[in-house]
Image (spheres, rainbow, N blue to C red):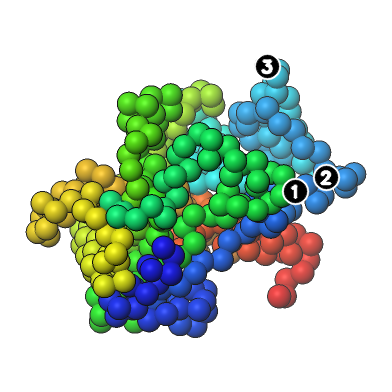
Amino acid sequence: MFQVYLQAAQQAGHPKSDDFAGPSPHGAGAYDFTINKGRRVSASSAFLRQALHRPNLRVVTQAQALCLNWDANGRVQGVDVLHHGKKVALRAEREVLLCGGAVNSPQLLMLSGIGPAEALKAQGLQVRADLPGVGQGLQDHLLVRVEHRALGGVTLDRLRRVDLAAWALFKAMVWGTGPATSFPLEVGGLYKSSPDLAQPDLQSHFLPALSSAALRLPYFSKVLPQDRGAGFFANVFQLRPESTGSIELASPDPLAHPRIRPGYLSATQDLVVLREGVKRLREVFAQPAFNAWRGVELAPGPKVQSDADIEAWIHATADTVYHPTSSCRMGGNTDPMAVLDNQCRVRGVAGLRVVDASSLPRVTSGNTAAPVYMLAERIADVLRGRLSL
């Protein structure tokens, strides 16, 4: 099915791409993954676990950060955490590196008095640094899925059977082989919403199975019955959205969740680009390569054809790609909303950096994990005095 998709994409006029991160990313091709011997490689396994033996590293789990703490000179000197029900003060000899992500980093800054002054005062918090950009500029990728019934039985839907799923998991854990050792979105494409564009502005992944997006345990038997049959879908999302949202404090209580206001589709052009992305996927699935496999379109469905209908369907069904960024963004000295300088130091606050996806000036044109690793390695070089690449 992966080869069928690649063939159909070329029939639809998209070139073949051998490297989505290369000089000519436009087209359809296979993705690279951080998988080793059938298991996903995470930041924890690739970086943290390799350093656990070091005497200058201690990993504390089951701990909730409460707020930053300050010395008498107004310098950040550590962080207070709740650990097994007790408040513990952790101290830094040199600097505090905050890596809470696009949601929790701005939350902790604001709980510590760093952020928009009026909003902090409204929560009864002392203002340590008036930085209006904290929590602002939030960006994320938003996707929709074009889904078809499959005529053949070669899709991954067979793994919904408990016995086959258990066997796939057993093979993966014991021998490192089988379908559970690879990511099912192996191929896809970088497409253009308009032929006039110099670079692609859409990303897509193809999966030879029906979407599990509706799965909500423990009610899966009602929402996603085992006899759904076979199908396939492709997702699509806009690479460079203009819409922005915010992270705001709902309460001065550090255990309370912040308000996440993603602001999806608040920019009109984002809806237009995503609508054209749906058309690109429909064009791919309509090609002769899919004739032997293509059943009825399940989503958006045959009745959704006009631009207005597609846009209404997007508003009703769009889903996050889980790429939130830019809520504590880096920027130049003339940017009043920049929270960080180009070395991730918090402006006007000594002893503190933010090093995570929230630091990115805007959401990246693709997945966010590798760029965040790159950012972290760069700041590690800066801290160690390795200023040149």
Closest to the observer: 229 or 379? 229
Q: Mark 2 — residue?
A: 52
Q: Quadrant of residue 160?
A: top left
CA gap, disc 1 and disc 3:
26 Å
Residue visible at 45% across and 72% down? Answer: 29
- SS of the residue at dot 1? helix
What number is the disc on residue 48? 1
**Marks 2 and 3: in contact by CB < 8 Å?**
no
- Left/right of residue 126 with respect to residue 98 in the rendered view: left
Closest to the observer: 125 or 51? 51
Q: Is residue 296 visible?
A: yes
Residue visible at 49% across and 54% down? Answer: 184
Q: Is residue 237 visible?
A: no
**Marks 2 and 1: in contact by CB < 8 Å?**
yes
Q: Amino acid at mark 3?
A: Gly
Expressed as whole percent of the image width and height from the top left, the position of residue 8 reads 33, 72
What number is the disc on residue 85? 3
CA gap, disc 3 and disc 2:
25 Å
Mark 3 or 2, closer to the camera: 2
